[in-house]
Amino acid sequence: METFWIRSGRDKLSPMNIVLGITGGIAAYKAPDLVRRLRERGGEVQIVMTASAEEFVTGTALQAVSGRPIRSNLWDKEAEAAMSHIELARWADVVLIAPATAEVMARIVSGGAPDLLTTICLATEAPLAVAPAMNHIMWSNPATQANRKVLEERGIHILGPGIGSQACGETGAGRMLEPDTIAAAVFDLAVGKGEGLLTGRKVVITAGPTREPIDPVRYITNRSSGKMGYAMARAAAAQGAEVVLISGPVNLPEPPGIEVRNVLSAQDMYEATHTCVGEADIFIAAAAVADYRPAEWREQKIKKNEESMSIDLVRCPDVLASVAALAAGPFTVGFAAETEKVDDYARSKLENKSLNMIIANRVGSDCGFDTDDNSVNVIWTDGEQRFPEARKSELARDLVELIARHFYAARGTDPQPRLTVISNIE
Ligand SMILES: Cc1cc2nc3c(=O)[nH]c(=O)nc-3n(C[C@H](O)[C@H](O)[C@H](O)COP(=O)(O)O)c2cc1C
């Protein structure tokens, strides 16, 4: 298992200290799983529950999985004597609230501190992340949206919410993100500010699918979830890079500290890429850009009058090839998503498009797209390296490191010697 250690203002490398606030939403039942995911990554987790949260999940279960006594009462004399709320606020490298109710968001916005959790939020200098979880109408309520906006403006990281079926039986935006997604985002918060192999470098990354419109209600797209590209963006930022992420339509939280430019079609992605790639040191094309789009766009919805119909398709611009062809362009890395002859096709793409490196991955109904894990083979002109199946977030860290090493080798320079953030052990 991989463990992360951070240098957090203390004089030695220590595990990441996470204050996990659990509030009174139905998604609190996922809290034990979230604690496990945070601890798997090497986090020390101190749970702080609100009184409402105790209605949904027991302190006993949470104490067992976190390995630390639960804190909930601001007025608990014994607990306060052992570690006061101010010490707890200082101890935290990150404060995460998951699930975060509409109510706790409002309390944080107001600056009130009627309970232990919100007192810690006021007293900490650590990054604060909240993972909202509520009924979709509560989430879209103007009051909640106004609170979300204020929290974002104050630099508080909003993780999600996701869209999907809800405990109330309805469907919409308001589901808490999956524990593993939250855990990955939290670790990126702590490491994302770091300096590393790519400090002082600009990296442009594309991610997700594109949508090629047919008429006002239909489009052609593909199964890319954007997870690999987003993980690459977070990993590059964690290595100190200034990252621009050009994203097709995905259902993922915006990674903190990364400039995200949202696009829809292949043409949009081409244009967005060329507005910023000129200054980039490295370009990583992880997006699944459509190869073809409808030749014409119908202004009105096509009616089903005929037994069959055909749509003429024309080639979309090739974003990756166009960047690789730039004179004095960036170090260019492509992805090849293939269902067969994966390495062969990837190798020809590397050569035909004159790329520096290509990351070949098999895609199919059960692998590659929209999964949390991936296995890839990275190929360059005179070598290759296989990466066995791993979580996309972990894989991305290794891939970014490999890309950085090849980038410096190609440029004949060394990284700036300021590796202060992370050491991955085991
Ligand atoms: C059964 C039940 C489920 C609830 N689920 C949620 C929820 O998912 N999200 C939410 O924001 N509030 C939910 N609430 C309302 C909160 O529990 C309530 O606003 C509470 O005051 C929140 O307190 P806290 O933020 O201090 O934990 C629920 C209430 C009940 C009774």
Image (tube, rainbow, N blue to C red):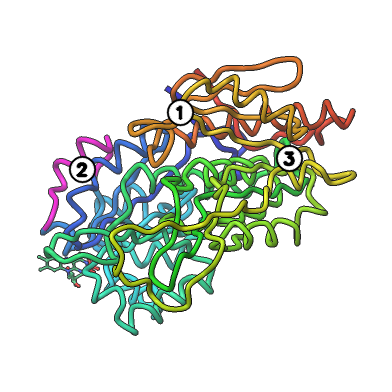
Q: Which residue is mark 3?
A: 198
First-in-chain label (3 vs 1): 3
First-in-chain label (3 vs 2): 2
Q: Amino acid at mark 1?
A: Thr
Element under disc 2: helix
Element under disc 1: loop
Element under disc 3: loop
User: In the drawing, what numbered circle is on residue 62?
Assistant: 2
Q: Position of residue 337 (x, y in %)?
A: 52, 33
Q: Quadrant of the N terminus?
A: top left
Residue at the bottom extreme, as displayed: 142
- The Cα–Cα distance between marks 2 and 1, rounded to whole angstroms, is 43 Å
Eye-nearest disc, 3 or 2: 3
Q: Position of residue 29 (x, y in %)?
A: 17, 50
Q: Which residue is mark 1?
A: 339
Give the residues drawn in magenta, as a range: 56-69
| Crowd around label 2: few <14 · some 14–19 · many ≥20 (10 Å) | many
